[in-house]
Amino acid sequence: MPDCERFGPKGTKGAKQGIVMGLDEYETIRLIDLEGQTQEQCAAQMNIARTTAQAIYTSARRKLAECLVNAKELTITGGEYELCNGNRETCHCPCQGRCPRRQKNI
């Protein structure tokens, strides 16, 4: 989960329509761009197909570019995701089942 859910430009005049990024898109940016994972590694950790990870990542990058270039506010919320359930057999995150965040949101 992001520490901050809203980002935006300062000092702009006039409200522009903001962009909404889903948590699944946020996670692909975090895993690929920040953690340096490949799309294959990202897909495995998120328990989705590589082509799905690629599509989510492409959408997220486009939204980030739209915010930066056109000075729009970015809100991170929603999307389809499941946080670690704490089960070592089904957990796909690096915590290997020791994650304190055990909830499901859709």
Image: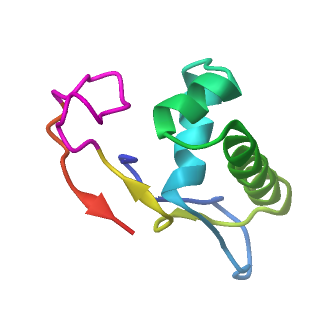
Residue drawn at x 72%, y 66% is 72
Look at 25% across and 22% down and name the residue there: 96
Q: Position of residue 66 (x, y in %)?
A: 81, 59
79 left or right of 9 in image: left
Please state, as top left, top right, bottom left or bottom right, where the C terminus lies in the image: bottom left
**Is 4 or 30 nearer to us in this picture?**
30
Instruction: Looking at this view, name the residue that lies furthest to the front.
Output: 89
The correct choice, above or below, for 64 with respect to 20 in the image is above
Residues drawn in magenta: 84-98
22 or 73: nearer the viewer: 22
Q: Is residue 33 visible?
A: no
Q: Is residue 19 left or right of residue 4?
A: right
Residue 64 visible (yes or no): yes
Q: Is residue 99 left or right of residue 71?
A: left
Say if 103 sits above or below 19 in the image: above
The chief SS type of the magenta part is loop
Quadrant location of residue 51?
Answer: top right
Q: Residue 93, how many percent across, how many down?
A: 36, 29
Report if residue 75 lies within the magenta region: no
At x 27%, y 42%, the residue is 84
